[in-house]
Image (tube, grey):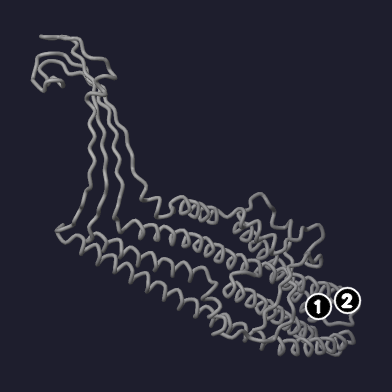
Amino acid sequence: MKRYFIYIVFISSACVCSGQEIWTFEKCMETGMKNSLDFQLAQLDVLSAEKTYRPAAMEYLPRVTANASHNYSIGSTIDPATNNRVSSNIQSDNVGLNAEMDIINFNIFTQARINKITLLKSKADKEAIINEYLLSLLENYFNVLYTQELLKIQQSQFENAKFNLNRVEKESGLGSRPKSDLYDMQLSYAQEENAIIETQQLLENQKLLLLQIMNITGTNPDSFSVAPFNLPTFTETADVNAVYETALKNNPKIKAAGLAEQVAAKNVNIERNKYLPGLSLYYNYSSFYYKQLNGVGNTQAPPFWTQINDNKNHNIGVSLNIPIFNGFRNHRDVQLAKIEREKNRVNSEKEKMILMQSIEQETAKQRQSLALISKMEATVVTAQKSFATTQAKFTNGLVEAVIFTTAKNQLTMAEYNLLRAKFTAQYQYLKLNLIQYNSI
């Protein structure tokens, strides 16, 4: 299928009535993206993933903690200076510093990779939400656009109905027309009037739904109309396989499903790494200060900093952790992770299948609409000629009102069908672009 650059233009003729503001699809898209709560939540998920991710080297930085305590021991207690039990009240202060650093930890790099993939997946999820939102917005926009143009056709036909009804009323009053023609014209007029009211109500509901999709409140549906798309004429149907191959590269839902599969595969590695040993380096520093408050043999305690210096202790070492047996929990966790990986693989294939089916359906509808357009254009031309001939005969009293009404209804229906076919072809073209390139 040839690619066309699409222009979204401001067309004043799109107004159904004067005084209405024209809304282009571009404006609706920008407004909806700004107001969409789902998009805002997705953006927060991206920010959360960005904060979570950091390079693996940072995970090897030492973990340092400091601690301090102030205690009172009353009655029989251990004298910190002699380690003998005495009957005394003692005040003591303890300070310490602990540092630990991983030397060998196989999960650090794996977890860092998971966090990076999770960040990419959160961005793909955000793009998928935007894609789904634009598909919904495009569908509702075209619903409004079609009904809006349909109303214009009905109103144009209604002017003709008014003229003919007034003329038949006069001719019937003069006796040149039978009463049956008058009744037929009155019925046709009432039916067209009812159809316009129904279309106006449908248009109001569709506009209201469009406003709700954009999360806009306080706006009257009658205050705006939507602008049509200015698309080049195209007659070629999209190739299913070509669209599918391009969509696999650009469609965000496929990207998100593939990244979820990668995360699940890394989680299997995380669980397997529990079988492997870990090596860490640690360092501890501690000291204390004490003094007797009262009791037998109460003596003057050395100064604070003297005791801190005399009582200090350094402890440095290497810790090796080798898993031996944990009740088969590691084996269970690995198997569960493998099942989760398989579920994500199946889900990825499912998304690809759904994508292919969607493309097949949309290209079929596009082909059918394009085939109908040329036939319906010819039908409209024929219906116009038939109606013009019948109009002349009816004016000269050669045919009854029911025949005139039938010819008019045939023309109206032909115009309806042509309008729907054209809008359907445009909608399928834009929808396929959105599916294929993730843009309009």
Alpha-carbon span between mark 1 and mark 2: 10 Å
**421 or 2, which lies in front?**
2
Dots 1 and 2: beta carbons under 8 Å? no
Residue 12 image position (x, y, % from top left): 81, 65
In terms of image quadrants, where is residue 213? bottom right
Q: Earlier in the sequence, mark 1 or mark 2?
A: 2
Disc 1 target residue: 182
Q: Amino acid at mark 2?
A: Arg
- Disc 2 element: helix
Nearer-the-camera pick, 32 or 102: 102
Give coordinates of residue 209: x percent, y percent.
Answer: 61, 60
The residue singled out by tag 2 in the image is 167
Q: Quadrant of residue 127?
A: bottom right
- Please give the name of the residue rendered at 75% of the width and 87% of the height, measured from the top-left corner: 377
Q: Nearer the viewer, residue 292 or 325?
A: 292
Kindly state the secondary structure of the residue where label 1 is placed. helix
Numbered circle sitting on residue 314: none
Relative to 433, residue 10 above or below: above
